[in-house]
Image (cartoon, rainbow, N blue to C red):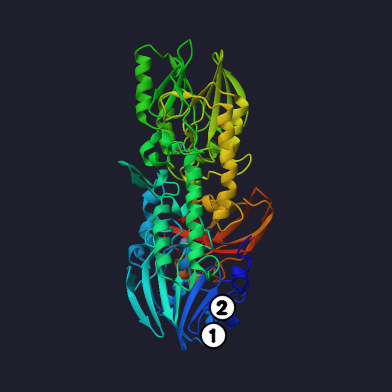
Amino acid sequence: MQGVDLSRRGFLQSVGAGAIGGAAVALCPSSSDAETTDSVTGLTEHVLVYRGSINVGIVRDGGRCLLIDCGDGSVAGALGGLGVASVDQILFTHHHRDQACGAYRFTDRGVKLGVPAGERDWFEKVSAYWSDPKHRWHIYCFHPHHLMLAEPVRVDMGVKDGDVLSWGPAKIRALATPGHTDGSVSYVVEADGKRIVFSGDVIFDQGQVWDIHSLQKGFAKGGQRIGDYHGFLGAVPELIRSLTRLKEVGADVLVPSHGRVMTKPPEAIDALTRRLDVCYDQYVAISALRHYFPRLFSEFEGRKGHMPFAPTKPAPSCLRHIGTSWVIISRDKAAFVIDCGSANVIRALEQLIEKGELRSVEALWVTHYHDDHVEAIVEFQKVFDCPCITDRSVARVITDPPAWRLPCISPNQARVDRATKDGQSWQWREFKMTAYHLPGQTLYHSGLLIEAEERRMFFIGDSFTPSGIDDYCAQNRVWLGRDVGFDRCIALVEQLEPTHLFNCHVDPSWEFTPAQCRFMRENLARRETLFGQLVAWDHANYATDDSWVRCDPYEQQAQAGGKATFDVVVTNHSAEQRAFACRAVLPRAWMKAAADKANKGARSLDWTESSVPAKKEGKVSVAISIPKEVSSGRYVVPIDVRYGSWTLPQFAEAIVVI
Ligand SMILES: [Zn+2]
Ligand SMILES: [Zn+2]
């Protein structure tokens, strides 16, 4: 894993009042040998970097300093050893929780905060974010990212592009560098004859970014527009413009929030721009989105390595396509319904019954948990008395939505009568049905093969269109790798040889040839390598899957004076076993309540350690005692994570509703 030494010392120091003071200081006169393993690295006489869970910039002037970002706040423990007695102010590059979760420790002591003007609300008004149902249900927008502070902090200054601050021996200029977040800024620090740029998460290291899911963003082209949900890597053009701005600064040193200090900024930036181009090209080459929004991708048409669309054919007469539902009608006029995203489907079925085209509705199959496929299931179940059947992975989500935080999720809790195993078959009228787990468009997705006479009809939910695979929303947990994600789905298509594929949003059917299946799997294998090279982690999936550390249940009701319990579930995308540890961080309001006798006054609970085998899920259980005096409300409980050599403060959260 790269960046191994990055946080070793911060890791040992840990967060909190007990942080070790007097950390060793290594002052390097020139930027060329800026790499040390100590927690503080000097870049010039007055500009230093504290290397904790993130890199924190320290500009010092005698016994006082200014910080750029503060991470978990453990930098406070290192300042004493530098002879720094006070912090004047902190400038933040962006709103992410790992940048700023320690800020309250400084604001409590009167330190002033400057934050990007465009992200000010995501520091000061986070309670409004967390209590707004649109950030919890039917999630189609990913800006701002939910990795934001659990509780608000006071801000003194909004920083805009071009703002200049003279502070002590340094001149600091703000440079708008959006991409990783919409309002990200970089800080150009001129001091001691050097130009040092603190660039947040615009770049991780030469040719690398910290994550990919932050780049999920809507865009418009050729008169067509898509939202964040459809915009995989949609922020890349903005990111590249920011990288170009950074390059033009002519910095001697580039200091990322996550990653290694770069002493050759132009090379580092050019390598990243090239890789982003190559990765985007690979993504577009087999994208299902080309079918829905061809004008967004017209510049790629006919490009070498891009898969031609499969020809379509009409659906057989035993099928009806109503909204996002497919209805299979038997010879004796019974209906088997696939998905129910809208009451219009129920009305249409009732009309078919009135007209005598249908006699009965006998089953409901659910392809996946997205609201446009499940929203009206509860109503359907009131009108039609028939079993609801789906793959186990889908059943887990739709029977208990509060337990999950996923894109397009509906709060409606459905009843599932039969949760199927992969490969389970049964007969319905003249049709043989076989259920599959199909982790394509989302990880929680099913496929249903329906065979009659010479037809092999495969209902693939939203996973494919005639132009390829639907992997355009990273937050859906679309994994790269052999026998997971779309590699597994395409292998299933190769094995089942369906004569017809049916997507819930596409009228005609089509089939993929063996050559097309091979083409897509080769693209995915190549992409696993290319995306792996693009990101900080030792596998691409960590950078796309923003639920690789998640709480189960995500949200729960609890009583004051009672307990909240949940698992922290970690998906190990690496090829080797990984050690991990988690601890919950308690809301500050709970600490104030009765000086929190319940949790012995500690802000964070003890670490719980475990390990997880390669390519598997592991979990640890967390139990929190809720003080009796806590008032009712919605509380965000962040989770500190250590994973292999990474320290990831407040990397996930659980919601506890009192
Ligand atoms: Zn970030
Ligand atoms: Zn869907």
Up/down of 93 relative to 341, above or below: below
Q: Quadrant of ligand 2?
A: top left
Sooner in the amino-acid sequence: mark 2 or mark 1: 2
**Mark 2 secondary-structure assignment:** strand
* Image position, residue 553 (x, y; %): 53, 49
- Can residue 566 be seen? no
Q: Residues within 10 Å of mark 2 (few under 14, many from 20)?
A: many
* Image position, residue 317 (x, y; %): 44, 14
Q: Residues within 10 Å of mark 1 (few under 14, many from 20)?
A: some
Residue nearest the viewer, comparing 338 with 522:
522
Up/down of 159 relative to 431, above or below: below
Instruction: Verify CB contact (< 8 Å) between mark 2 and mark 1.
Output: yes
Residue nearest the viewer, comparing 443 with 180:
180
Residue at which label 2 appears? 40
Residue nearest the viewer, comparing 83 with 490:
490
Image quadrant in which the C terminus is located: bottom left
Amino acid type at circle 1 is Leu
Amino acid type at circle 2 is Val
- Residue under the image location 50 percent in, 49 percent down: 278
Measure the C-alpha gap from mark 2 to mark 1.
9 Å
Q: Is residue 42 left or right of residue 115?
A: right
- Residue under the image location 52 percent in, 50 percent down: 544
- Ligand 1 within 8 angstroms of badge 1 C-beta: no
- Residue under the image location 45 percent in, 54 percent down: 214
- Can residue 620 be seen? yes
Image quadrant in which the N terminus is located: bottom right
Q: Is residue 124 left or right of residue 279?
A: left
* Image position, residue 320 (x, y; %): 41, 20
Residue at which label 1 appears? 82
* Image position, residue 343 (x, y; %): 36, 29
